[in-house]
Image: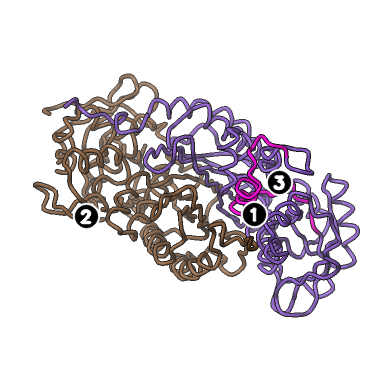
Chain colours: A purple, B brown
Amino acid sequence: MDPLTYKQSGVDIEAAEAAIRRIGPLAKSTFRPEVLGEIGAFAGFVKVPAGYREPVLVSSTDGVGSKLKVAFLADRHDTVGIDLVAMGVNDVLVHGAEPLFFLDYMAVGKVVPEKIEAVVRGVAEGCRQAGCSLVGGETAELPDFYAPGEYDLAGFCVGVAERSRIIDGSTVTPGDRLIGLASSGLHSNGYSLARKVVFELMGLKVSDVLPGLGRTVADVLLTPTRIYVKPVLELLKAGPVRAMAHITGGGLTGNLPRVLPTGCKAVIERGAWTVPPIFTLIRETGKIAEEEMFRTFNMGIGLSLVVAREHADHCRALLTSLGETAWIIGEIQAGSRGVEYVGAR
Amino acid sequence: MDPLTYKQSGVDIEAAEAAIRRIGPLAKSTFRPEVLGEIGAFAGFVKVPAGYREPVLVSSTDGVGSKLKVAFLADRHDTVGIDLVAMGVNDVLVHGAEPLFFLDYMAVGKVVPEKIEAVVRGVAEGCRQAGCSLVGGETAELPDFYAPGEYDLAGFCVGVAERSRIIDGSTVTPGDRLIGLASSGLHSNGYSLARKVVFELMGLKVSDVLPGLGRTVADVLLTPTRIYVKPVLELLKAGPVRAMAHITGGGLTGNLPRVLPTGCKAVIERGAWTVPPIFTLIRETGKIAEEEMFRTFNMGIGLSLVVAREHADHCRALLTSLGETAWIIGEIQAGSRGVEYVGAR
C-alpha cells in the first residue's frame, strides 16, 4: 500500500490556498475604516464605530437556499453571493441597524478556485452595496457531502444600532400606513416551489425564455435579491419608522406579524401595487392558491415599512427619490395579529 | 392536476416551526446579561459589554467538516454542536478576545425536529462552556442538496477585545517558550483521512472497539473538541501571552506560523508530550508520513501559546491548576518563519 496523504482523502489544501489568494483582494475592496486589516490570523477585527452612546450589536445568519440550484444549472456563480449578503443585511436593517461586517461559509464538493472566486466576488459586491465589510470566511471541502459542482452558502451579518433607536414594532398603532418597497424578483425564497413549476411542470431549461416575460429562466430566477440598506438608512435619518419587515420565507403573511404588537393587524390592499409577472406565471401554471402564494413568495414586495399615517406620503416620496419603487400597500388596524388581504383579486 | 403547495415541493414549514419551538429554551440557557432577548424578530441583539475603552469585535466562521459523517453513522447528534462552537470560540480566543455571541446555520435534507434539537443542544452546551450567548440561527431545509439523514453546520462567533490587548504574535521573540494544551482527540480536523483509515483500511464500524484503545470508534471519533476559553481568559488576566494558535486544519505545522513574526521559527521537541494513541493508530495503519500527520492532525495539542521564557513555568502551572493538561513543547528561535521538529521520533 502506498502511504496515505490528506490530498488522497479528497481534500486539496493547495487548491484551497489558491482560492484564498483570490479572495483576499475581493474582501479588501469592502473594508470600512473600522476594519483592522492586518492582524487577523484566525479571525476578523472590526472596531465598534464611534458615535454610539449605547451600541447594540444586531446579528443575523441565513443562506441562499435552493436558488443555488438554478446557479448550478446555469453555471453562473457571481450573483448568489449578492443574495447571501442581502438576506443578512436586510434582516439587520429592519431593526434600524447599520450593517457593519459580514462573514461567509462556503461548503463545496471540490475546491475549484475560479468558482469560489466568482461566489466571493458576488459576496463582495453585496457587501459594497450594503456598506459593510467582508472580514472573514471559510471554504470547506466536503467531497462526501455535496454532489460534483454543487455547494452551499451561509452568511453572517453584524450591524450596530443605538439602543434607544432600535426598531422593533412596539410603537405600531392602528391607523399607521404600510409602505412596500419593490423586490427585484423572487429574491431568495420559494425556490423549491418555483423550480418545481418552471423546470418540472413547464419543462423549461435555464436557457429558455419564460413565456410572456421575454427573459430567460436563468436571468429571471437569478436576479439578485435587492439590498435596501442605503436608502432605508437615509430614510431613518429623516424620520421615524415604527416597524420594518424583510419579506423572506413566509411572504408578507409570515413576516409582517413578526413585528406587529398584540392587537394590531396589517390590512393589505391587493391592487396597491403590480405583482410582477413571474409570480403570476408561477401561480397560474402551478394552480397555486393565492393564500399559498402570499405565504411563500414576496409577490413583488421585498421590504415593508410601517410609518405614522401623517408621514406616509413623505416617506414614500423620499424612498422614491432615493431610487426605490415604493407603494402605500395598506394600513394597520385593530385586530388580532396577522395579515388580511382586501380588495379585488 | 392538484394545486401545488410549498410543502409538496419538499419544504415543511410546520416541522420547521416545531423545531424552532424546541430551540428557543436552549438558546435562552446561554444568554449573558448583554443579550437583549425579547426584541429580535429578524435578528439577535447584544450590547457591547461595558468596561472596554476601545472595543474591537473579533469574528470567525467555521464548520465541523466531515466529522459530521461519523455522527450520521453513529446516529449521535448532540456533540457536534460543541465542536461547532469550539471551532469558532477558540479562533476568537487566540487573539485575546472574550467570545460574546454565536449563531449557527444548519442545512438539512429534511427537518426532523428531534435531530435539530439534539444538534442545537450541543451548540448550547458549547456556548455555556465558552460563556458566549447563542443569539441566532437558521435551519434551512434543502431536500435536493443533502442525502437523507444528513446535514451540514456552520457557526459564527463574535468576541470582544480591548484594542491595546489584542494578541497577534507581533511581540514574539527568539527564546520564548511554546506551551501546548492537550486536545481531547482529533477535534474537528483531518476526518477525511481518519475516516479513510478507520472505515476503509481497518474496515471498522462505528460500534467496533478501536484496537488498543478500548473505546468504540464512535466514542473516540466523536469526542467533542476542547473549548479553551475559560482557562485561557483566566491566564490572560494573570500575565502576558505573546501569541496563541488554535491547532486546526494544517496542524501545528500550518497554524503556528500564522502568528509568528518574520524571522522567528517554532522549534518543537517531539518527545515533550505524549501523542494520543488514536494518532499513532492512524499513522501506522495508513502508513502516513510523520510530516503529513503533523500538517493534518493536532497530534494531541489543541492550542499552543507563546510566552516569555521567564513566564513559561508559571503559565504552565497556572493552566494546570485551571484543569488543563499543559506541556512546554518547544521554543522560538531565530530563523525563517515555520515549524521545525527536533528530538527522537
**Which region shows up in magenta?**
A180-209
Q: Quadrant of the C terminus of chain A?
A: bottom right
**Left or right: A116 in relation to A186:** left
Quadrant assignment, res A247? bottom right
* Amino acid tagged 2: Asp
Q: Is residue A158 in view? A: yes
Q: Residue at x 19, y 30 (%)?
A: B288
Kind of residue indicated by mark 3 = Ile
Q: Which residue is mark 3?
A: A227
| Residue B243: x %, y % from top left | 36, 37
Q: Please tell me how crowded label 2 is: few (under 14), some (14-19), or many (20+) other residues with Cα within 10 Å.
A: some
Disc 3 chain ID: A
Q: Which residue is mark 1?
A: A92
**For the residues marked 2 and 3, what is the alpha-carbon distance in whole angstroms?**
46 Å
Residue A201 among those drawn in magenta: yes
Protein chain holding label 2: B
* Residue drawn 34% across the image and 59% down it: B77
Quarter where residue A73 is shown: top right
In whole angstroms, how far apart are the C-alphas of marks 1 and 3? 11 Å
The total of numbered circles placed on residues is 3
Q: What type is the residue that disc 1 sits on?
A: Val
Front tag of 1 and 3: 3
| Marks 2 and 1 close (CB-CB < 8 Å) | no
In what element is the residue under mark 1? helix
Residue B271, above or below B28:
above
The chain letter under disc 1 is: A
Do the residues indicated by labels 2 and 1 lie within the same chain of the protein?
no
Between residue B145 and residue B52, name the one nearer to us.
Answer: B145
Task: Provide the secondary structure element on which disc 3 rests.
Answer: loop
Category of crowding for the residue at label 3, using alpha-carbon neighbours closer than 10 angstroms: few (below 14), some (14–19), many (at least 20): many
> In the rendered image, which residue does mark 2 sit on?
B219
